[in-house]
Image (cartoon, grey):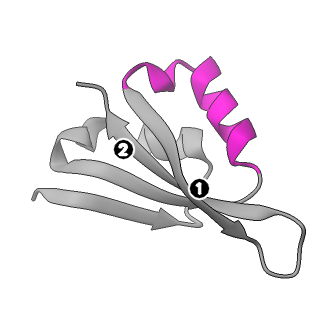
Amino acid sequence: HEFDTLVCRAVAPLPKLLFWLQPHWEAFQQLLLIKGPNWIAEREEASQRKQLNFVRVQQIASYPLAGTESESVILQVRRNA
């Protein structure tokens, strides 16, 4: 199957998701992730593991996390051309 967009919310940390999806990047155009406040640390870990060499991660939206002073973000992940 081929899909334009795969959406994940509260599934796993970014490095684990990128590892799981690595063999399937051809099946979809983009990955949208809803991530909490730890997303920056997760991105750094993925970068250290060289997982960002093949994909581009871009924050496309953010919004307050209800009941906290933190925020959640929506990240767009696309494979590099």
The residue beneath circle 1 is 12
Question: Circle 1 — which element?
Answer: loop
**34 in relation to 41, above or below:** below
Residue 16 lies in the magenta stretch: no
Q: Is residue 14 left or right of residue 54?
A: right
Q: Position of residue 38 (x, y in %)?
A: 76, 49
Q: Is residue 21 left or right of residue 14?
A: left
Q: Position of residue 67 (x, y in %)?
A: 87, 81
The residue beneath circle 2 is 21
Name the residue: 57% across, 38% down. Answer: 15
The circle on residue 29 is: none
Residue type, mark 1 in image:
Ala
Q: Residue furthest left?
A: 1
Residue 36 location, quadrant: bottom right
Q: Position of residue 57 (x, y in %)?
A: 48, 38
- Using the image as rendered, state which of residue 39 and residue 22 is in the foreground: 39
Residue type, mark 2 in image:
Leu
- Give the residues in magenta: 38-54
Residue 64 location, quadrant: bottom right
Q: Is residue 3 left or right of residue 23?
A: left
Q: Which image quadrant: the N terminus? A: bottom left
Residue 47 lies in the magenta stretch: yes
One can see residue 10 in this view: yes
Q: Earlier in the sequence, mark 1 or mark 2?
A: 1
Q: Which image quadrant: the C terminus? A: top left
Q: Main secondary structure of the magenta part?
A: helix
